[in-house]
């Protein structure tokens, strides 16, 4: 949040600089199974954000001393590509990326049935290729889809959205300019099935009423995005080439059985 407030972010018709209404989301597109090497993967475009997620595991945790005998550990790594932002991002983790990795990892851990996989790690790589505000929520939303693609049992796919305050108004899903020059940004993520809040932060200031209004708006949007996640998963398993692959794998397995007989 910047203190600069002489930039007009909402026009006389109540429209935002990208033409959206106060409660309107940016366009969202999710694709599942985009990487062949990963156990699960997803790609999300959310407004100007482009993020790819790869999931590995559950696999034996290494080094061994990190193993937990009663559950899986979840390692999330949020990373911004050097070319993802206007000014070249210095490669490697900074304070912000370490914080985001930690809160995303904790959120995912609360949805995954980690006790089913003792001594293992579940590794989640979130690569931001292009950033335009809201990347932590977009990354977490895509990470949940990638976990589902990897077949990892969860209470539900985590989903979220941010809301904030721009030119004195509460608006949904801030873009880069609104994030930079607005008065507040509140990212929220939930587990739809249980209604648990698994990520909630606030940058800037809101009154209690404004805060409640923002949360209400984000929750409603999250349920809409939850459907996009499910549709993306279904789309993968109804793609003709995927069906072909499944058929080939089945045939190979059958041949394998023949060899043993
Ligand atoms: N950003 C940037 N350089 C950085 C970090 C962030 O240009 O080193 C931009 C980027 O577009 C990001 C936005 O600032 O999406 C908002 O960042 P914030 O820390 O609020 O996280 P986000 O909203 O992406 O979850």
Image: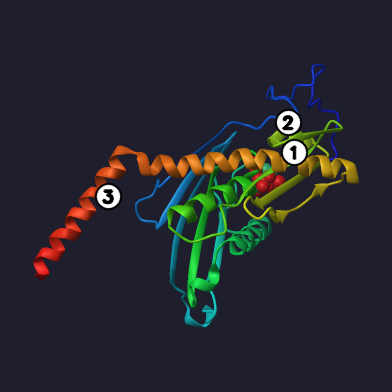
- Residue at mark 2 to residue at mark 3: CA–CA distance: 41 Å
Helix, strand, or loop for circle 3? helix
Q: Is residue 45 above or below residue 40?
A: above
Residue 37 pos. (x, y %):
35, 55
Query: Is residue 133 in sight in this rendering?
Result: no
Residue position marked by numbered label 2 in the rendering: 23
Q: Earlier in the sequence, mark 1 or mark 2?
A: 2
Using the rendered view, name the quadrant where residue 258 is placed. bottom left
Is disc 1 in contact with disc 3, using a CB cutoff of under 8 Å? no
- Residue at mark 1 to residue at mark 3: CA–CA distance: 41 Å
Q: Earlier in the sequence, mark 2 or mark 3?
A: 2
Helix, strand, or loop for circle 2? loop
Nearest the eye: 31 or 99? 31
**Is residue 198 shown left or right of residue 7?**
left
Q: Residue at x 39, y 56 (%)?
A: 38
**Is residue 117 shown left or right of residue 243?**
right
**Is residue 203 shown left or right of residue 239?**
right
- Within 8 Å: ligand 1 and the Cβ of disc 1? no
Q: Residue at x 56, y 40 (%)?
A: 227
Residue position marked by numbered label 1 in the rendering: 217
Q: Is residue 185 above or below residue 47?
A: below
Nearest the eye: 97 or 70? 70
State which mark lies toward you, 2 or 3: 3
Q: Indicate the quadrant containing the N terminus: top left, top right, bottom left or bottom right.
A: top right
Q: Indicate the quadrant containing the C terminus: top left, top right, bottom left or bottom right.
A: bottom left
| Quarter of the displayed picture in which ligand 1 can be seen | top right
Q: Residue at x 44, y 65 (%)?
A: 57
Query: Is residue 109 in sight in this rendering?
Result: yes
Crowd class of label 3 (few under 14; some 14 to 19; many from 20; radius 10 Å) = few
Q: Earlier in the sequence, mark 1 or mark 3?
A: 1
- Residue at mark 1 to residue at mark 2: CA–CA distance: 7 Å
Residue position marked by numbered label 3 in the rendering: 246
């Amino acid at each position: 949040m910047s203190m600069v407030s002489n930039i007009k972010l909402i026009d006389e018709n109540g429209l935002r600089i990208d033409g959206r209404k106060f409660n309107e989301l940016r366009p969202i597109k999710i694709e599942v199974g985009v990487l062949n090497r990963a156990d699960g993967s997803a790609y999300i475009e959310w407004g100007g954000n482009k993020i790819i997620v790869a999931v590995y595991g559950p696999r034996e945790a290494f080094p061994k001393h990190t193993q937990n005998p009663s559950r899986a550990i979840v390692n999330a790594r949020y990373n911004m590509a050097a070319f993802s932002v206007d000014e070249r991002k210095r490669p490697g983790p900074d304070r912000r990326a370490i914080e985001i990795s930690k809160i995303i990892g904790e959120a995912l851990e609360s949805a995954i049935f980690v006790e089913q996989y003792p001594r293992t790690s579940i590794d989640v790589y979130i690569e931001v290729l292009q950033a335009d505000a809201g990347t932590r929520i977009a990354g977490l939303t895509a990470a949940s889809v990638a976990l589902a693609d990897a077949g990892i049992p969860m209470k539900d796919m985590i989903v979220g959205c941010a809301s904030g305050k721009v030119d004195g108004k509460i608006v949904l899903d801030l873009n880069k300019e609104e994030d930079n020059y607005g008065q507040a940004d509140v990212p929220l993520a939930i587990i739809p099935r249980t209604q648990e809040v698994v990520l909630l932060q606030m940058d800037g200031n809101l009154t209690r009423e404004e805060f409640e209004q923002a949360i209400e708006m984000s929750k409603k949007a999250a349920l809409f995005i939850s459907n996009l996640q499910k549709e993306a998963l279904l789309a993968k398993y109804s793609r003709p080439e995927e069906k072909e692959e499944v058929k080939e794998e089945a045939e190979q397995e059958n041949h394998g059985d023949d060899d043993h007989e």
